[in-house]
Amino acid sequence: MLKKLALAAPAVVLSAGLTFAQGAPANQAPSGAPSAQSSSLSAPEWLASDIYKADVYDKSEQKLGDVADLVIKKSDGTVSQAVIGMGGFLGIGEKQVAVPFKDLKVSSAQGKDWLTLKQTKDQLAAAPEFKPEEQTGRSAAPPAAPPGEWLMSNLYKADVYDNSEHKLGKITNLLIDPSSGKIADMSVTLADSNKEASVPLSSLRIDTRNGKNWLVIGESKDQLMNAPAFQKPENKKM
């Protein structure tokens, strides 16, 4: 029996750091950051794992919330919006607000990088709440992306299968151009292997049978074993 695809992956994701205290003085990185982490945020391309669930700050270095999700357009493979989660506790009572992905910027000081937005907390609090449309015929109850879009929470760590319903592995990362939001590559870590295979996002689809959904890539495991390895950007120590 195939593992049912829950198209809203668990939120137990440990992003690559970006956990800082509030209220740091100007030109000083927010305090409390672990010193032995690395991030792609200073590289020309970002890893989705460095963004998804990462804390976000305003220009005064006050914490706004975290990146609760990313909205990805299927038509051209770009990240169009970042969903910012504000308030609540462990996701309960949290308000989510969508902002243009290009609004996410990186601030750096003392060898540390963190995500910032030009919007203030009051502006985000006054913005409409992000409520993805429900898809019909789904077997999972959590919110789904509107038609024609993916949510990062639907993809990250999700199982993927081949055309014969054999499990290939898990989606473990996306490589994103921060200036355009374009997804340059997708990483699939193969089952029973440490290999992170490079797979185009465009090859991903949803199959639905008997009320169950799962993610499918039209390649066999042997083909992915021989595919190019996913190339991460050069990481910078934070």
Image (cartoon, helix red, strand yellow):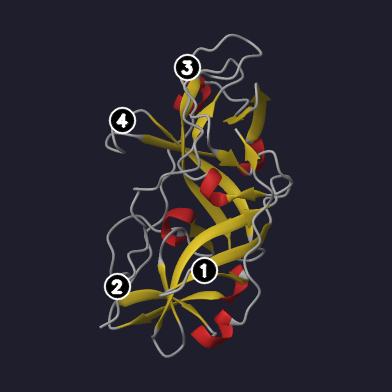
Can you identify the residue that label 2 sits on? 4
Can you identify the residue that label 4 sits on? 88
Q: CA distance from mark 4 to mark 2?
A: 29 Å
Q: Give the residue type at disc 3.
A: Gln
User: Considering only order in the chain, which callout, 1 or 4, is on the residue closer to the N terminus?
Assistant: 4
Q: Give the residue type at disc 2.
A: Lys
Quadrant of the rendering where the C terminus is positioned: top right
Q: CA distance from mark 4 to mark 3?
A: 17 Å
In percent of the image, x 28 and y 70: which residue is there? 139
Q: Give the residue type at disc 4.
A: Gly
Can you identify the residue that label 3 sits on? 22
Residue 220 can be seen in this image: no
User: Disc 4 vs disc 1: Cβ atoms closer than 8 Å?
Assistant: no
Q: Give the residue type at disc 1.
A: Val
* Callout 2 secondary element: loop
Q: Residue 100: x and y, percent?
A: 61, 41
